[in-house]
Amino acid sequence: MKILQQCMYFPPEVGGLESYVLDLTSGLVSEGHQVTMLTSRSVPGTAAQESVQGVRVIRTWFPGKHPLGWMAHTAASIPSHRRLSRDADVLHAQTFASAPPSMLVPRRRQPFVLTLHTSHFQRRSGRRVWRPALRRIIASADWLITASAQLLDMALDLYPHPRAEALTNAVDTSVFRPTAAALTPSPGRRLIVAPCRLFPPKGVTHLIDAMPRLRSELDVELAIIGDGPDRDALERQVRALDLGDAVRFLGWRSRHEMPGLLSSGEVIVLPSLMEATSIAALEAMACGRPVAGSSVGGLLELIDEDVGTHFRPADPAHLAERVAALLTRPDLPEIGARARRRVEQRWGLDRLVRRHVDIYQTLLDERL
C-alpha cells in the first residue's frame, strides 16, 4: 500500500519522536509498502527531497521551534500534502500539530490515522483554550493511536473516540544492542549516562542537583548526551556546584553513535518531569543497561525494579538515593540483560510495524 505520513520533525533531527517515525516508516518499507514522509526543513541545509532508508522524504519550509512556527509550517505544508495525498491509500499524521492537512482532504476514499506523542500534547490537553481544537483533531481521525496508556486516557477525556488504542513505541533491537563502550570514565569512577534534550520538561537540572549527594556515597561521573536551550544555564549550575570534573556535556550525537554511548554507562538516568513513552528508555534497555527514571507517564509503564528503578520527579535527594541503590546492586549486569530481553519480547519493531499494517488494512477493507 501507499502511505503518506506527516510529522513535524524527522532525522537528522534527534529525539524520541524522530527515532520512532524513522523506525516505523523504514519498517513499513521493509515490508514492501511505499512510504512518503512529509516533514519540515527544521535542520538547515537538509535536502528538500531525498530517500532515507527507503522512505521518500519531502521537506517544506519551517520558521522556528515554537507554537507560531509549528502552525505556520503546517499551513505552508498543505499544498504539498494535497498533491501527495492524491496518490496515497492511507494518510497518517504523527502528532496533533501535523494533523490539519489530512483533516482538509476529502477522505471518503482515504482513511486517516492519528498518533499522539510527547509532552506537548500532555501540556496542552489540560488547557481550556486548546481543548476544543484538540477535540476536533482527535474526532477527525478514523483510528487514534497514542504512545502510552496515560496519553490515551487524556485523549479519551477530550473525545471518546470509538477506535483508540495505546501502542507503546518500539525500538530496532538490531541497531540498539550491547556494544563496545564509546566512553571511558576516569580511573576508579562509575559512569552514568543521561540521554536528554536540554529543556525544562526533561528535568536535567534536578539530576545535576543530585550529583553532590550521589558523589557523597559513590565516586560517580555523569555524561549528558543532548543539547537544547538550557545548556548554558546547566553548565553554570555545574560550575556553581563545583562539579566540573564530574559532569560532561557531550552535546548532540548522531543516531549511529548512540548504542556505543548508551553501552558506556552502568546506569542510564532519565529525570523527566513528564514523558509519553520514552524512546530513550527503550533504546537504553535494548543496549542492556538498567534505567533509573522518574515516576511519570510512560516511564511507569516501561520500568520496574526488575530492569531499573524509579524516583520521584523533581526530587534530587530521592534521585540520588535510588541511583546509588541501583549502582550498588550486585546483580547489575543481570538487570541490564533482563532489560534487553523485555524489549525484545514486548517492544520490538516488528510488533509495531505489524500492528500498523493491520490498522491500515482494516480501514482500507472497510472502504471496498
Image (tube, helix red, strand yellow):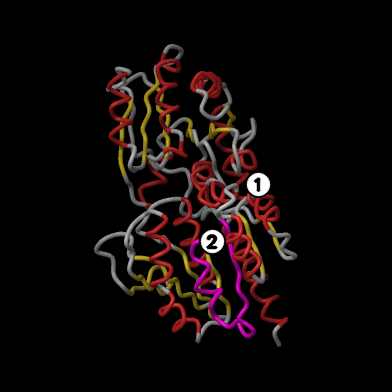
Mark toward the start of the polypeptide (1 vs 2) = 2
The magenta segment: 94-116
Q: Is residue 304 left or right of residue 184?
A: right
Q: Is residue 292 magenta?
A: no
Q: Which residue carries the number 1 mark?
A: 150
Q: Quadrant of residue 246?
A: top left
Q: Which mark is residue 341?
A: none
* Residue 103 among those drawn in magenta: yes
Relative to residue 364, is residue 334 depicted above or below? Answer: above
Question: What kind of residue is marked 1?
Answer: Gln
Q: Is residue 34 above or below residue 307?
A: below
The reply to whether the C-beta atoms of the residues labelled 1 and 2 are less than 8 Å apart is no
Q: Residue at x 50, y 81 (%)?
A: 85
> Where is residue 252 shown, x and y percent of the image?
32, 46
Q: In the image, is residue 226 above or below residue 102?
A: above
Q: Residue at x 39, y 58 (%)?
A: 68
Q: Is residue 332 visible?
A: yes
Percent of width and height locating residue 228 = 34, 43
**Residue density around tag 1, few if under 14, some if 14–19, many if 20 or more, within 10 Å:** some
Give amino acid for label 2: Phe
